[in-house]
Amino acid sequence: MNINYNESNKSIEIKDGLKNYVFLLNFLMVLNLLNAILNLSDIKASFGFMKIIWLVLGVVSIVILYNSIFKKSTREKIPIDQIKGLNQRIFLGRKKYFIELKNGKTRDLLEVKSESEFTKLRTMFTKNRIL
């Protein structure tokens, strides 16, 4: 778990490589969306099964891009005055942990994988008066 509290900056530092992962995901979704637009722009072809597939792929790409741009954060240094809380959700049978920010975004914690690591992180947050 590479999550540290920096007392001089009054911020949380997270080193997990999420920024690179999200950049790659956004890049691939933009390419997928452009490909869907190019495939749907052929007016002469009839609206068939392939057009429906490309339409669904384009919509899925838009939803994923919207979620990753407007709902998720990839910041590695988060000032403590921007932190709203520490929370968890269950997705496909696995618990995922994240930090809620005051601007409505969430910062996923990829390094926190077990309940014991989550309790250690929560105690660090309460000890440093973040929560």
Image (cartoon, grey):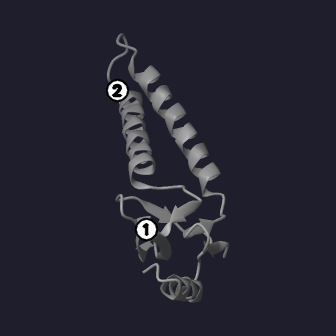
- The residue that label 1 is drawn on is 81
Q: Residue 20, relative to residue 114: is it above or below? A: above
- What residue appears at the point 48 percent right and 86 percent down from the top-left corner? 126
Q: Amino acid at mark 1?
A: Asp
Question: Residue 48 — which label?
Answer: 2
Residue 37 falls in which quadrant of the image? top left
In the image, residue 62 lies at what x, y percent? 39, 40
Horizontally, is 60 left or right of 14 in the view? left
Compare residues 37 and 27 and report the one nearer the observer.
27
- Tell which circle, 2 or 1, labels the residue nearer the N-terminal end: 2
In the image, residue 118 lies at what x, y percent? 54, 83
In the image, residue 13 lies at what x, y percent? 61, 67
**What is the C-alpha distance between the residues marked 2 and 1?**
52 Å
Q: Where, quadrant-wise, is the C terminus in this rendering? A: bottom left
Q: Amino acid at mark 2?
A: Gly
- What residue appears at the point 50 percent right and 75 percent down from the top-left corner? 94
**Identity of the residue furthest to the top in this view:** 44
- What residue appears at the point 36 percent right and 63 percent down from the top-left corner? 102
In the image, residue 46 lies at what x, y percent? 33, 18
SS class, disc 2: loop
Residue 47 falls in which quadrant of the image? top left
Horizontally, is 45 left or right of 1 in the view? left
Question: Residue 54 — which label?
Answer: none
